[in-house]
Image (cartoon, grey):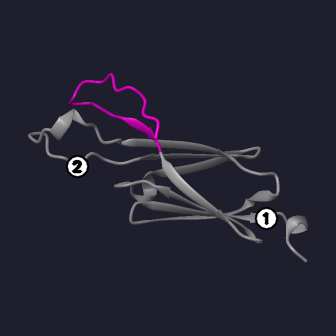
Amino acid sequence: MTELPNTASKQTATCTARAQYKSSTSKLGVMITVDLPGVAKQDVSITSEKQQLKIQAQRSDSTPEQWSPINNSTRPTKYELVLNIHQDLDLNKTSARVENGVLSITIDRHDENLPR
């Protein structure tokens, strides 16, 4: 995981991280699962351009102000992930859902690339 440096003050601190993901392929397409802990469905943005899929998400920081982190660690509040998608896959045949902090994306193959 690659984290960008955090230069903001503690009260307005945000930390951006590259989202962790796993993918699996089948004869019909690909399934991508992205870990987005604490992110609500309405705070996820998925866009595509050419054969690239861009995922951006933000979670609200619900930690009380009077709490302080242990070991000076910062939890990411923004996630970003850019994936290059193989040309056999059709980004027009994509479905996605968010459940319990996990984004699941299914991308079908182009009809001409399906097994016969």
Q: Position of residue 113 (x, y in %)?
A: 87, 65
SS for callout 1: strand
Q: Position of residue 101 (x, y in %)?
A: 40, 60
Question: Is 59 located above or below residue 70 in the figure?
Answer: below
Q: Nearer the viewer, residue 69 or 14?
A: 69
Relative placement, left or right, of 14 versus 23 is left
Q: Nearer the viewer, residue 106 or 24?
A: 24
Which of the marked residues, 1 or 2, is nearer the chain's N terminus?
A: 2
Q: Pointers 1 and 2 in contact (CB under 8 A)?
A: no
Relative placement, left or right, of 13 versus 81 is left
Residue type marked 2: Ser
Badge 1 crowding class, 10 Å Cα cut-off, few under 14, some 14 to 19, many 20 or more, is many
Q: Per the image, is 3 magenta?
A: yes
Question: What span is colored magenta in the figure?
Answer: 1-18
Residue in the picture at 91% in, 77% down: 116
Q: How many marks?
A: 2
Question: Is 114 located above or below residue 12 in the figure?
Answer: below
For disc 2, the marked residue is: 62
Distance of label 1 from label 2 (alpha carbons) = 40 Å
- Residue farthest to the left? 66
Whether residue 92 can be seen here = yes
Q: Nearer the viewer, residue 50 or 17?
A: 17
> Which mark, by number, is residue 109?
1
Instruction: Tell me which corner region of the image, top left, top right, bottom left or bottom right, holds residue 82.
Output: top right
- Residue farthest to the top? 7
Residue in the picture at 82% in, 52% down: 87
Instruction: Tell me which corner region of the image, top left, top right, bottom left or bottom right, holds residue 92.
Output: bottom right
Q: Position of residue 52 (x, y in %)?
A: 70, 44
Q: Per the image, is 28 magenta?
A: no
Instruction: Tell me which corner region of the image, top left, top right, bottom left or bottom right, holds residue 39.
Output: bottom left
